[in-house]
Amino acid sequence: MIQLEKLTADQSPAQSVKTLPKDRKRGFNRVLPPVGLFVVIIIIWEIISASLSGSRKFLLPTPQSVVIHGLLARDAYSEILPSFVRTSVLALGGFGVAIVLGMLVAAVMYRFRWLEKAVFPYLVALQAVPVLAVAPLMAVVFGYSFVAKGIIVVLIAFFPIPANFLLGLRSVDSGLDDLFRLHRASWWTRFWKLAFPNALPQLLTGFRISAGLAVVGAIVGEEFFQAGVPGLGIRLLQYLQDVEYNRLYGALILSSFLGIGFYLIFTWIANRVLRNWHESVIQQES
Amino acid sequence: MKTIAETGAFLNAPHMSTPSLSFEGVGLTYKDGTETLRDINLKVERDEFVSVVGPSGCGKSTLLKVASGLVEATQGNVVADRDRLGYVFQDATLLPWRTVASNVGLLAELHGVAKQERERRVQEAIELVGLSGFADRHPRRLSGGMRMRASLARSLTMDPEVFLFDEPFGALDEITRERLNDELVQLFLARHFAGLFVTHSIYEAVYLSTRVVVMSPRPGRIVAEFSIPFSYPRGPEVRFSPEFAQIASNISSALRGTELE
């Protein structure tokens, strides 16, 4: 065995070690604009609230009033936090089912192309069905139950998962596919070692879209059924009827936090998984 | 078929055994009637390095696909030991989510080689192509030349008897390309495989090969064959010798001849 010439000119430069101040500055630059906008929005809110005439003031309480009376007051948070947890569980549960079912459907469609041709149009159609139109039927079949609400979540959050996953499975580089075929890899091997990892970026994008939709689905489901343990959706309607606008805005803020939280968690997971190899993550870094 | 530069003997006299790779009257016509290859007769033995040059779209790459079995010939026979076949594609075709070491180990993994043996081969191959120290990198963080080295190393783990190259250095800059050419020659001398190399570059073909064959435009046929007399290892000065220029010029005119048909 011979030793080949050592590399010199065509080495890519070793990655420079990140220095802390620069890193911190970069983080600062990323955080500053949204925080700035947040402050502006609060100020505008405050101005609008102050400019409302006395009889209409209840429509938009000031931000501090919402935080103090709607969220931090003892009887407010003791009511709304369990609702928050309840809705989170509903959204997560439905989302989990959507992930498992969606990936399974996509994998089967990937395996059998004729099935894709048969099934995919219905997936698209499913997305076009107004979910609230289906809800009464759910109520008849499953009662005003957690399961019925969960099905609403699944219906709303489902589509992005099989659609994105299938796209990823199908976008395997033909050269890599040739390589695996050349070495007589079985369908399973090609799926696990090639198609599946190749689809991860798209799959994780599907997760991110779906996570937000799951929260929407959970709140819509609760608002429709208005039964069982009260989640945020039920609280929103209740506070509206009771003219509890501080709490209404409080519940609204928590609903948004739930959606944003879901999105951030799955963005973080995607970045962890893809950080070594995928353009979308690498470009963010540099 | 004409043979021009028949001077000089090979330094590595080929063992006159059965050829490692042989095309016997191979033709390929696609279902839509496109005839891509016609009556290809070509033998490549161990210690032979044959380059194929030809105009774009003449079926050079298809010839390799047929050799590897990825595409089935519609006429004639291809004889090759496909269990010990190396195939380097135009792109490095590395799995972007795997490190260099893990990419290099892929083929052994697909063939079910035990982990310990696999690791040994991976380390050896990585050292051989000069990628030691980069084993834990992901392909995204490698230069084009280094990715090609990783791709070469991956094939080397299977200790190929027949090595197919589909314009592997086409996308690289000239300096990197020349260095990799030299390293490929060293690999060839060390490993004694039968090499079949497709390229656009006449100079690359002459520099690397024991023989160069010229293919015609579609349907691809072999219209000329040249023996390259230089002994290995060939220093950079070979590229500037009058003899080298003469052979290159002969191949070039043979190529032009195919286009005038």
Image (cartoon, helix red, strand yellow):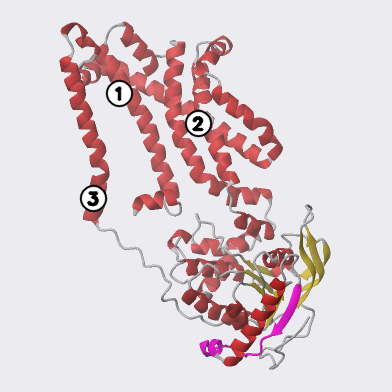
* Callout in the foreground (3, 2): 3
Question: In screen coordinates, is B221 left or right of A272?
Answer: right
- The verdict on residue B234 being magenta is yes
| Amino acid type of the residue that numbered disc 2 sits on in the rendered structure | Gly
> Residue, x 62% and y 72% (percent of image)?
B199
At label 3, counting other C-alpha atoms closer than 10 Å, the crowd grade (few under 14, some 14-19, many 20 or more) is: few
Q: Which mark is residue A96?
A: 2
| B227 within the magenta span | yes
Residue carrying label 3: A24
Residue type of the residue flagged with mark 3: Arg
Residue at 79 percent across and 55 percent down: it is B33
Could you confirm whether marks 3 and 2 are on the same chain? yes
Q: Considering the numbered disc 2 on the image, is that residue within a helix, a strand or a loop?
A: helix
**Along the horizontal axis of the image, is B49 left or right of A158?**
right
Furthest residue in direction bottom, as rendered: B8
Helix, strand or loop for disc 1: helix
Quote the CA–CA distance across marks 1 and 2. Answer: 24 Å
Vertical order, A67 against B240 (above or below):
above
Mark 3 near mark 2, Cβ–Cβ under 8 Å?
no
Q: Residue at x 76, y 71 (%)?
A: B221
Q: Residue B201: image x %, image y %?
A: 59, 75
* Segment colored magenta: B222-240
Pointer 2 chain: A
Crowding near pointer 1: few (<14 within 10 Å), some, many (20+)? some
Q: Earlier in the sequence, mark 3 or mark 1?
A: 3
Residue B20 seen: no
Residue A253's disc number: 1
Q: Callout 3: residue from which chain?
A: A
What separation in Å lies between label 3 and label 1 (alpha carbons)?
A: 29 Å
Disc 1 residue type? Ile
First in residue order: circle 1 vs circle 2: 2
Establish if B81 lies above or below B203: above
